[in-house]
Amino acid sequence: MKPIVCDVAIVGGGPAGSVMAALLAQQHELKVVMMDPKLDQRWIPNYGVWVEEWEALEKLLGFSLRNCLMKTWPNTDLFCGGSHGIPVDERLRIKRAYGRVDRTALKNELRTRALDGGAILLAKALDAESVVHDEEGSLLRLDDGTRVRARFLLDCSGYQSRLVTLDGTHDPGVQIAYGIECEVDMCPYGEDAMTLMDYRTDYLDNQAAEVQMTAAREPTFMYAMPMGPTRDGKKTRVFFEETSLVARPPMSFDECKKRMELRLKYLGATVLSVEEEEFCYIPMGGAIPVRSQRVVAFGGAMGLVHAATGYQICRSMAAAGPTAKAIADELKKASYNPDTAARAVYDSVWTRTTRLQTPALSAPHPH
Ligand SMILES: Cc1cc2nc3c(=O)[nH]c(=O)nc-3n(C[C@H](O)[C@H](O)[C@H](O)COP(=O)(O)OP(=O)(O)OC[C@H]3O[C@@H](n4cnc5c(N)ncnc54)[C@H](O)[C@@H]3O)c2cc1C
């Protein structure tokens, strides 16, 4: 069977792959093939974003994602009391809106745009060992034997990518979080705010000294999104996540779960039912891809993460417009060369300045 021929093959249909498929197909009118064995599955992470940053994407992407927030809060709260003379109940309220991404709406929005631009979406995996590069582009084989010939190969397969070579030792600290979407008898935090960090440790005061010492060595905080009362008004829904901001080696999910249970009990909240569990694992920076290689990585595969917070989705979305333009500009050249093109696209994202900021801030800014 003849291979499917395209301008850009995108490996991975997460947020990074989907936004690139939308931009390359719809705005740059390129022939795009995107493949992902989990194409039709729900995206797992519950993405949280600053509303300001999310709204700013409209200008960078050329379309709005406002309808892709399922809930917003006008305030963001932090609790850091209990030490350094700060009273335990002191609340720091930031008047900056926070939002929870509606992952289904976001996926639909990006996929609709990709399909509108004529992109071909395949629910198949790339066999990473099969990739052959030549002077015209790359030839790929998928797990069902389908072959794809692409002039440009874009790797959006996430932080476990097997397609790109990293520059140097990759030993990042890791953000770990254990989360639950649940119904509780009462929300221990204000309903008019999203609690970004509850770093208090008074919930451990009655625990053994060893437990307290472990928590001092490996601190975690509660991240909570109050989702409002249930239909009968008798309970309330909350997304709780006990989070280790960064640790090397990573903290265990079990420890986060144990602390969440202790904290909620101390705060007087009883979990009545759990709708969904989330196991969050985010490498916080680390090595970035070698820039002189044929395959260009994007999103998690490229290390596009804010190394101090773990925020990634806005970083990827913000860098998507300039990256798509750089790819389209290269593909338009009469003297198109896939190696030169890959290097030019890497250089457009990882500028000298952004490379110098690594790992202090290992995410490129749009420019
Ligand atoms: C639980 C969790 C919660 C998070 N919460 C937040 C948050 O609140 N805010 C934030 O900014 N960031 C958050 N992140 C970090 C980051 O935004 C996500 O990891 C994001 O999903 C990365 O997007 P991506 O498209 O690069 O990779 P992914 O979402 O990992 O998508 C990669 C895709 O590639 C596919 N793939 C892999 N190998 C192949 C192959 N060989 N062939 C074809 N397809 C392949 C996979 O099936 C997958 O669908 C979170 C991460 C996790 C894990």
Image (cartoon, rainbow, N blue to C red):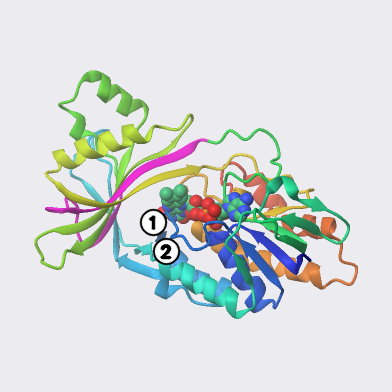
Numbered range of the magenta stretch: 173-196
**Extreme front residue here?**
1
Counting from the top left corner in percent of width and height, residue 152 is at 76, 62
Residue 363 visible, this orientation: no
The span from disc 2 to disc 1 (Cα, nearest Å) is 7 Å
Residue type, numbered disc 1: Asn
Q: Are marks 2 and 1 in contact (CB under 8 Å)?
A: yes
Give the main secondary structure of the magenta stretch. Answer: strand
What is the quadrant of the N terminus in the image?
Answer: bottom right
Q: Earlier in the sequence, mark 2 or mark 1?
A: 1
Task: Specify whether tag 1 is near ligand 1 (CB below 8 Å).
Answer: yes
Q: Position of residue 27 (x, y in %)?
A: 65, 78
Secondary structure type for disc 2:
helix
Q: State whether residue 42 appears in this view.
A: yes
Report if residue 187 lies within the magenta region. yes
Q: Identify the residue shown where x is 70% and y is 70%.
A: 325
Residue 46, label in figure: 1
